[in-house]
Amino acid sequence: MAEIKKTRDSIFSLGVVTIISFILILTLTNFFFYFLNAKTGSGFGFKEILFALTLTILIIGFLSWIKSLIKSNPYFGILSGLTALVVGIVALFIKYKGPNTTVFAIIASIIIIIYLGFYFFKFRKGEKRKVKEFDDDL
């Protein structure tokens, strides 16, 4: 019975922070498309909900990959995550402009920075190096 539980944990090991981030980003992207529809009349329906879900899956997948980078090298991982965040915001502002886009970008940035910061501080604690590990004077 213990082996079944061990297998189940390894399959569903997304983590609470990742699941909460998924729900927040999915809700945020749906609100963004809803308010975009209210402002422009572009339509909001199944296609926009499916696009929001796909976008959220891609964002969380990318953040999970960044989490693995942070686990192996915290500083490189956090730099990669922040660079991807800036690129994503620039791409968003190339396509959409306005106060709704700005609010969406700020809230999404806060969610992503909290996600990156949580895993950075979690995995950085295990990366304590020895005092003279890189000292060339020896």
Image: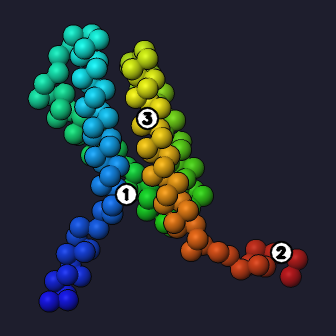
Residue 17, label in figure: 1
The quadrant in which residue 40 appears is top left
| 3 and 1 marks in contact (CB < 8 Å) | no
Q: Earlier in the sequence, mark 1 or mark 2?
A: 1
Q: Please, is residue 135 above or below residue 67 in the view?
A: below
User: What is the distance, in whole Å, between disc 1 and disc 2 at their CAs?
Assistant: 40 Å
Tell me which amino acid carries mark 1.
Val
Residue under pointer 3? 107
User: What is the distance, in whole Å, between disc 2 and disc 3 at their CAs?
Assistant: 45 Å
* Residue positioned 43% across, 15% down in the render: 98
Answer yes or no: is residue 76 visible.
yes
**Is residue 46 or residue 90 the one in the foreground?**
46
- Report x, y in % for residue 71: 49, 66
Q: Which of marks 2 and 3 is nearer the N terminus?
A: 3
Tell me which amino acid carries mark 2.
Asp
Mark 1 vs mark 2: in front: 1
* Residue positioned 52% across, 35% down in the render: 86
Instruction: Answer with left or right where residue 92 lies relative to residue 31.
Output: right
Element on which disc 1 rests: helix
Q: How crowded is mark 2: few (under 14 residues within 10 Å), some or many (20 or more)?
A: few
Mark 2 vs mark 3: in front: 3
